[in-house]
Amino acid sequence: MNTIAKAKGLLVEPGKTWDAIAAEPMTLTGVFASYVLPMAAIPSIASAIGTYLGGNLPNFAQLLVDYAIALLAVLIMGKIMPPLAARFGAKPDADAGLKLAAFAPTGSWVGGLALTVPSVGSLLAMVGALYTLYLFYDGAQRLFPVAPERARMLGLLAVVVSFLIGMLLVLGIRALALGIVTT
């Protein structure tokens, strides 16, 4: 399944697509090169276009930081999910953690296309971000098989952890950029 087919599948038929992703062998470099790097760039590129169309010059440094945060979030989430899933009785599968972290943000990345529309693009992109939370919820349950009574809690935990990772990365990097944190 290629990048566009995976993205479309996760947006239209997430259950079927998660099952196909679960069965597919993947490596970190392969997933990053073929999916994460191009998909995570969509919001930054779209934002630059939308800012320009709105009559302003894009802040390319900020766009690069946002892109780096997206990539770092995938790496961190991929490492955190296997041990968390093990607490719910799932096998601590590093491949499943990578797959969840790499493909669940698809909603946000594709929703980022809306940022090309000045003023209302942010609101439309928020819909994609909310759908990403659903993809984390659904994907965690499919990639880390656990007892049915624990599956929903695992899915909710994946949503909370993904949200916290994103917020902490944004706040931490902005604090560093403002010079609040000293090394």
Image (spheres, rainbow, N blue to C red):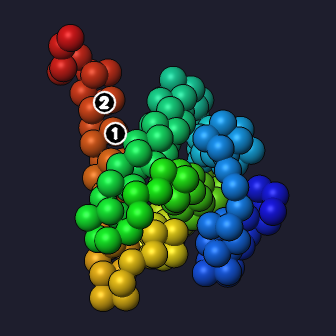
Q: Residue furthest top?
A: 183
User: Is residue 111 in sight in this rendering?
Assistant: no
Image location (x, y in percent) of residue 29: 66, 36
Q: Is residue 147 above or below residue 155?
A: below
Q: Nearer the viewer, residue 58 or 151?
A: 151
The residue beneath circle 1 is 170
Q: Secondary structure at mark 2?
A: helix
Q: Is residue 52 above or below residue 14?
A: above
- Mark seen at residue 174: 2
Q: Nearer the viewer, residue 172 or 63?
A: 172
Indicate the amino acid at tag 2: Arg
Q: Label 1 vs label 2: CA separation?
A: 6 Å
Indicate the amino acid at tag 1: Val
Q: Is residue 117 above or below residue 153?
A: above
Q: Residues within 10 Å of mark 1 (few under 14, many from 20)?
A: some
Q: Residues within 10 Å of mark 2 (few under 14, many from 20)?
A: some
Task: Please indicate whether residue 55 sits to the left or right of residue 136 in the image.
Answer: right
Kindly check if marks 1 and 2 are in contact, taking CB atoms under 8 A apart as contact: yes
Give the residue drawn at x 18%, y 20%.
Answer: 181
Q: Nearer the viewer, residue 63 or 74?
A: 74
Q: Secondary structure at mark 1?
A: helix
Give the residue drawn at x 23%, y 16%.
Answer: 179
Q: Residue furthest bottom?
A: 149
Give the residue drawn at x 33%, y 29%.
Answer: 173
- In the rendered image, the quadrant that contains the N terminus is bottom right
User: Is residue 71 in sight in this rendering?
Assistant: yes
Image location (x, y in percent) of residue 9: 71, 73
Image location (x, y in percent) of residue 147: 36, 84
Task: Please indicate whether residue 166 sits to the left or right of residue 138 in the image.
Answer: left
